[in-house]
């Protein structure tokens, strides 16, 4: 069964070194079960979503569209830069994974979600240190791998500033369901930072400035 034209045809979860799709952009997904408990993170694609079939049922939907649209988007992004972005996203995500998992755990419990009052109070007190640890890990990796980000066309100082602003907003949300920065915040930064932190915002042929 071929399914809709915008169906992702590749088996999942994706391995970190996946290259079969020219538009693939790795994203570490922090899923939860039906009770809101965190599951083991796994690699997905920043363009992958859940679509609903006309006849009923669901499928893995590529938000870029069918194969021609995926190829067109990848070409607009420039192959060399896209490869560098992939490498940087994977390397950085793996480096800060423990700190992200810890922050997600703390933030998920800061507003209750079935926890006792004592646990909620404890989680509130842990949010600041967890966010600071994540920011330190992020800055340390970016500072230590400046050439990696410059190959992707990203100015490290802009990336660090955007990440810091995004984390501050993230931990103050009333209810957190996914690890994703606010589009309004990310959108204020240069295009390469947007493409790196929120690639879902640059689907219109790369949204590259002329």
Image (cartoon, rainbow, N blue to C red):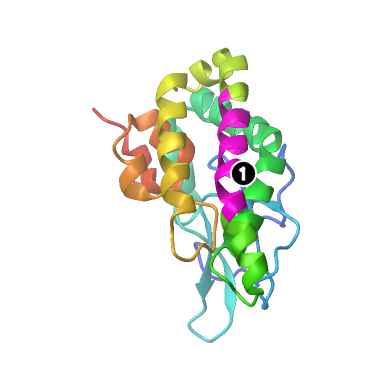
Asked if the magenta segment contains residue 191, the reply would be no
Q: Which residue is painted at 56% across and 57% down in the image?
A: 124
In percent of width and height, residue 46 lies at 53, 49
* Farthest-out residue, bottom: 55
Q: Which residue is painted at 60% across and 42% down in the image?
A: 129
In percent of width and height, residue 121 lies at 60, 63
The range drawn in magenta is: 125-139
In percent of width and height, residue 133 lies at 62, 36
Q: Which image quarter: residue 41?
A: bottom right
Closer-to-camera residue (103/53): 103
* Farthest-out residue, left: 210
* Image position of 104 with respect to 34: above or below: above
* Farthest-out residue, top: 147
Q: Which residue is painted at 74% across and 45% down in the image?
A: 15
Which residue is disc 1 drawn over? Answer: 130
Q: Please tell me whether the stretch drawn in magenta is mainly helix, strand or loop.
A: helix
Residue 54 appears in the picture as rendered: yes
């Amino acid at each position: 069964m071929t399914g809709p034209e915008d169906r992702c045809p590749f088996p999942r979860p994706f391995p970190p070194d996946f290259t079969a799709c020219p538009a693939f952009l790795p994203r570490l997904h922090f899923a939860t079960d039906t009770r809101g408990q965190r599951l083991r993170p796994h690699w997905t694609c920043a363009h992958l979503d859940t679509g609903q079939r006309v006849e009923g049922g669901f499928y893995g939907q590529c938000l870029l569209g069918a194969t021609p649209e995926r190829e067109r988007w990848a070409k607009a992004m420039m192959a060399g830069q896209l490869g560098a972005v992939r490498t940087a996203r994977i390397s950085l995500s793996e480096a800060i994974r423990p700190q992200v998992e810890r922050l997600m755990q703390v933030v998920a419990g800061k507003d209750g979600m079935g926890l006792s009052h004592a646990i909620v109070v404890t989680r509130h007190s842990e949010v600041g240190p967890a966010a600071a640890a994540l920011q330190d890990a992020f800055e340390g990796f970016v500072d230590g791998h400046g050439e990696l980000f410059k190959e992707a066309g990203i100015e490290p100082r802009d990336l660090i500033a955007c990440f810091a602003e995004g984390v501050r907003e993230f931990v103050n949300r009333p209810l957190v369901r996914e690890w994703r920065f606010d589009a309004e915040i990310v959108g204020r930064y240069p295009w390469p930072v947007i493409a790196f932190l929120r690639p879902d915002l640059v689907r219109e042929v790369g949204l590259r400035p002329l």
